[in-house]
Image: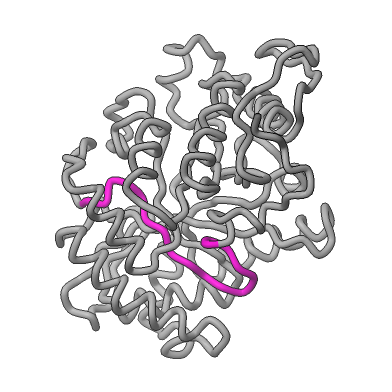
């Protein structure tokens, strides 16, 4: 029987430790690792690209939870069920972290989420980082018989159910999802303490997120605004648990140009630019305290395989060299300030 390790901490989890270190910034990539029009990717060659991302030193591969096609959103993510796909990708990789961005808790029974998450974590050797959210596609809620007005309350309740059944043997708990009376247990348990990150606010006040989650996933903003957001997060974490490290994560759409010197122009939740600006921008995020950036390559003009390779061979090594040094290329230049203002969340 797989016992709970009550002494384990999230920083010991292989996936968490690959992604997060104090004062450092790492990069992950969303599936599909593909540039495509419309809402549906081809999903061609993803296994090889996942292996290449691992070899190049990317920290994590991210999947999304999109149960139903909603044409108004324009993006189905990796198409496949996130748990099935994570199992598939886990079998094709060895060391890179596997992360969800994010599982929609109100649409899933918490015991099913907990069992799936622990299963992937076990089968991958502790590489799972569980990002969770309350959901933002209104069409999905009536299809699952869930009142969208209750999503914040359900998120909070299910979050705590998942945490309880993953970390205790034969727990006693009562929730709207059901009752456990210490006469049944959820197996398997994760390798250690499974990291759980909250996406956006998920209907919760920030002090609750800082006190209950192991990290926070949020959206791209200009450098100055993100610095304020990071500072607010660090303050709440310190209040909830002085001395704790709880990472700050954000997404970023990138259209990497052939010309490495191309100045930036804004796109949806990101920018098109050459790699020199991308490096300066990422390092500026590191300086203000961002710990991980999830790259989304959907809107790229170049093949995603080329972009993955260029960032992996040119940007990642330079970013690593700068981890304990001054920002790469100096502060943002005047021409970059416009992008600083246009990188605002559209949620």
Q: Quadrant of residue 184?
A: top right
* Residue at 36 percent of width and 50 percent of height: 30
Compared with 184, 102 (above or below) is below
* Residue at 57 percent of width and 19 percent of height: 109
Q: Range of the magenta residues?
A: 18-34
Farthest residue to the front: give it. Answer: 1
Compared with 159, 55 (above or below) is below
Give the side of residue 135 with respect to residue 168, left or right. left
Compared with 165, 74 (above or below) is below
Of residue 72 and residue 300, the one placed in the foreground of this image is: 300
Compared with 252, 114 (above or below) is above
Tell me where residue 280 appears, x and y as whole percent: 41, 80
Of residue 276 and residue 45, the one placed in the foreground of this image is: 45
Residue 31 lies in the magenta stretch: yes
Give the side of residue 173 with respect to residue 36, left or right. right
Tell me where residue 178 appears, x and y as whole percent: 69, 11
Tell me where residue 62 appears, x and y as whole percent: 41, 48
Q: Quadrant of residue 151?
A: top right
* Residue at 68 percent of width and 45 percent of height: 193
* Residue at 26 percent of width and 64 percent of height: 308
Residue 315 lies in the magenta stretch: no
Which quarter of the rendering shows the N terminus? top right
Of residue 266 and residue 175, the one placed in the foreground of this image is: 175
């Amino acid at each position: 029987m797989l016992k709970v390790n009550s002494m384990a901490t999230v920083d010991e989890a292989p996936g968490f430790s690959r992604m997060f270190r104090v004062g450092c910034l790492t990069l992950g990539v969303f599936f599909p690792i593909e540039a495509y029009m419309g809402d549906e990717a081809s999903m061609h060659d993803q296994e090889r690209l996942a292996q290449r991302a691992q070899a190049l030193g990317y920290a994590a591969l991210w999947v999304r939870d999109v149960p139903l096609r909603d044409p108004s959103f324009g993006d189905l993510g990796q198409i496949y069920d996130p748990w099935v796909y994570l199992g598939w990708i886990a079998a094709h990789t060895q060391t890179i972290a596997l992360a969800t961005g994010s599982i929609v808790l109100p649409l899933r029974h918490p015991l099913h989420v907990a069992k799936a998450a622990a299963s992937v974590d076990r089968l991958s050797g502790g590489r799972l980082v569980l990002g969770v959210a309350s959901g933002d596609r209104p069409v999905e809620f009536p299809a699952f018989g869930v009142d969208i007005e209750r999503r914040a309350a359900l998120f909070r309740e299910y979050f705590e159910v998942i945490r309880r059944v993953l970390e205790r043997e034969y727990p006693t708990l009562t929730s709207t999802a059901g009752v456990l009376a210490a006469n049944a247990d959820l197996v398997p348990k994760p390798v250690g303490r499974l990291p759980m990150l909250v996406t956006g606010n998920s209907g919760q006040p920030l002090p609750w997120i800082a006190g209950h989650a192991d990290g926070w996933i949020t959206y791209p903003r200009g450098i100055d605004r993100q610095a304020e957001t990071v500072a607010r997060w660090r303050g709440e974490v310190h209040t909830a648990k002085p001395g704790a490290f709880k990472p700050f994560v954000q997404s970023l759409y990138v259209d990497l140009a052939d010309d490495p010197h191309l100045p930036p122009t804004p796109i949806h939740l990101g920018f098109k630019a050459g790699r020199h600006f991308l490096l300066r921008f990422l390092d500026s995020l590191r300086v203000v305290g961002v710990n991980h950036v999830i790259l989304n390559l959907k809107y790229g003009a170049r093949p995603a395989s080329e972009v993955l390779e260029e960032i992996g061979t040119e940007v990642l090594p330079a970013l690593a060299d700068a981890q304990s040094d001054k920002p790469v290329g100096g502060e943002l230049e005047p021409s970059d300030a416009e992008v600083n203002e246009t990188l605002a969340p559209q949620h």
